[in-house]
Amino acid sequence: MRAWVVGRPGPMASGPLELVEREVPEPGPGEVLVKVEACGVCRTDLHLAEGDLEPRRPRTAPGHQVVGRVVATGERVGVAWLRSTCGTCRYCLRGMENLCPRSTYTGWDADGGYAEYVVAPADYVYPLPGDRPAGELAPLLCAGIIGYRALARCDLPPGGRLGIYGFGASAHLTAQAAIAQGAVVHAVSRSAASRELAMELGAASAGDRPPEPLDAAILFAPVGDLVPPALEALDRGGTLAVAGIHLTDIPALNYERHLFQERTLRSVTANTRADGRAYLELALAHPPRVTTAPYPFAEADRALSDLAADRVNGAAVLIMG
């Protein structure tokens, strides 16, 4: 099979991805072999390729928004970021398996969906309908799920004012979920195309800063410099949730300007399988508008380069030929 692997991590201009030929992997006990139809391109894949996220094994195939079919049964499934947990630690036992110290991740601890086949534990894949385009389903498996958890973590009150910083794959799905719940959404993005998309999806504003105090905010852009202004834009009692796995350094905070009046700063760490099931049930019953930028599988390096340069509007997706 063909697979893209991270050879030597570095800037996309240095060519960190390599297209290689490999044997089709063999599933072990409790695992399934999935023939990949499409794989979403996530900023986490970019962090791994460029070295912001330290590789856990050499020459790993990225990709954790996989839509495909189980070779043994033909069942349509999704393979997402969370690959396994121990099931016995105190975090797993209290329903917080996303914090399991022994958790593993698709496309980081094991090869992911930038390949024609992928192996995954059967207990960690999600059933998907067979009649919907794979390219539209793929972004739901990370962009959608992590946005769903971030929306819960930011404590947005009913009918509240939500700020979304960075308007890419996850943000454009999260905004739709928030608006459907009655929220007023303000998008903050430097991209003219992203601002236009936000307004098309129902945002109340899209610009350099929110026009009114916010009850809650989510930071999707991996830019620590945005944390102070995002906190400062919160109304009293507001919460900022940082949704990325990687963030550049946060500048010094001023207590009175950024945190006083019970403003809260919190992180979002992966997701539980319960998050995934809840979001997919919602998204499949009430499909969001999924804006995708499809790329042929052979152009995975171009897809990541475009993501690095903010040339992707919505969600980039690799489509198998």
Image: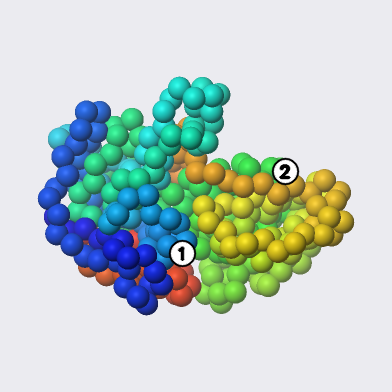
Q: Pick the quarter of the image with the C terminus.
A: bottom left
Q: Are marks 1 and 2 in contact (CB under 8 Å)?
A: no
| Left or right: 246 in relation to 123 | right
- Report how many numbered discs are placed on residues in the image: 2
Which type of secondary structure does the marked residue at label 1 adopt? loop
Q: In the rendering, at what x and y percent does residue 63 appear?
A: 34, 54
Structural distance between the alpha carbons of marks 1 and 2 = 26 Å
Q: In the rendering, at what x and y percent does residue 77 appear?
A: 29, 40
Three-letter code for the amino acid on which mark 1 is drawn? Gly
Is the image coloured rainbow, by chain, by secondary structure, or in one colour? rainbow
Q: In the rendering, at what x and y percent does residue 223 appear?
A: 60, 64
Q: Residue drawn 38% across and 54% down?
A: 55
Q: Residue drawn 54% across and 24% down?
A: 90
Q: Residue 110 falls in which quadrant of the image? A: top left
Q: Residue drawn 70% across and 64% down?
A: 251
Three-letter code for the amino acid on which mark 2 is drawn? Pro
Which type of secondary structure does the marked residue at label 2 adopt? loop
101 and 193: which one is in front? 101
83 and 202: which one is in front? 83
Residue 177 appears anywhere in the view: no
Q: Residue 201 falls in which quadrant of the image? A: bottom right
Residue position marked by numbered label 1 in the rendering:
314
Q: Pick the quarter of the image with the N terminus.
A: bottom left
Using the image, determine if residue 155 lies above or below residue 20.
Answer: above
Badge 2: how crowded within 10 Å, few (<14), some, or many (20+)?
some
Q: Residue drawn 37% across and 77% down?
A: 13
Badge 1: how crowded within 10 Å, few (<14), some, or many (20+)?
many
Residue position marked by numbered label 2 in the rendering:
157
